[in-house]
Amino acid sequence: MSVFKKSHNQTEKDTAKVTQLSIHSLQSFLKNDVRVHCYDTIDSTNNEAKRHSDKLTDTPVLFVAEHQSMGRGRLGRSFYSPECAGLYMSLMIKALPDADDIVCLTTATAVCVVRALKELCDITTQIKWVNDIYLSSKKICGILCEAVTDPVSSKVDSIIIGIGINVSASDFPKEIQDIAGALNQNIDRNRLCAKITDNILEMVNTIKERSFIDEYKAHSLVLSREITYTQDGVTKTATAIDIDKNGGLVIQTADGTKTLSTGEISVRIGK
Ligand code: BTN
């Protein structure tokens, strides 16, 4: 079933055809064995995954929704998730034994999304460290990876990989109007979701090889550019020079070379 969604200040050109999400369709595209839960509306697919985490077996579980009422982003931000206009998905998998591999999952996922968009939409996207995907200088996708720990052992039990993609243009809230964009392609979200999921599951099997790092670098929006970052409450300037094997950003500062492993940087986009 296809739905055309158009808001009052969108033009025909901005309006992409949106195919309804369905378990049946998703399963038909998936190559890997995955359990699928599909919702019309949910607070957050990451929250829903967390609520199911005690039932996780070796079979990965995918949660998708047409709408999120409390979509979450990194650093406590919200993620705008209007109905039928985006792809809101969370893939829950068993934790990997090696902590470095878990840290890498976020970087690897960005490459999985970039690949899927190239394969299915023939578009080339860029990655802003750590995990924002940009198209034509606008953010079209964010990634939020979360670990669920066992309350008794405090060990990481499962990993939730949350991905939000703006598929069709919509009325973005004022705060993000200048930076947010959308795919604006007539893409079947079931197909895109299945492709991203399969890419991630295949990547997880070979994560130790770090074969995604070169691809991550090739799509980086920040390498060789001046960035700003905040450390101990102070905002500093540096040049981004490399991505290390665990996805850390290597920067050249006035005091020498440093590696950022988390946090957020700013870079002037489109210049
Ligand atoms: C970011 O841009 O900071 C990350 C955004 C991640 C959004 C996705 S949408 C699906 C999943 N559920 C959430 O609540 N967040 C992630």
Image (spheres, grey):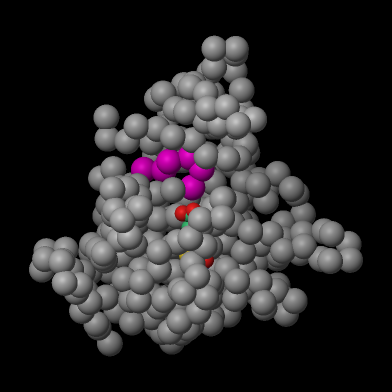
Answer whether residue 127 is magenta in the image.
Answer: yes
Residue 252 pos. (x, y %): 53, 18
Look at 11% across and 66% down and name the residue there.
Answer: 11
Residue 125 pos. (x, y %): 33, 47
Residue 223 located left or right of residue 75: left
Residue 8 pos. (x, y %): 16, 72
- Quadrant containing the N terminus in the rendered view: bottom left
Residue 251 vertical position relative to residue 194 in the rendered view, above or below: above
Residue in the foreground of this view, choosing between 83 and 214: 83
Numbered-mark total: 0
Q: Can residue 143 be seen in this view?
A: no
Look at 28% across and 43% down and name the residue there.
Answer: 137
Residue 136 located left or right of residue 146: left
Residue 253 pos. (x, y %): 54, 17
Q: In which quarter of the image is residue 36?
A: bottom right
Residue in the foreground of this view, choosing between 14 and 79: 79
Look at 50% across and 79% down and name the residue there.
Answer: 42
Q: In which quarter of the image is residue 84?
A: bottom left
- Quadrant containing the C terminus in the rendered view: top left
Residue 229 vertical position relative to residue 72 in the rendered view, above or below: above
Residue 33 located left or right of residue 165: right
Look at 26% across and 65% down and name the residue there.
Answer: 170
Identify the magenta region.
126-131
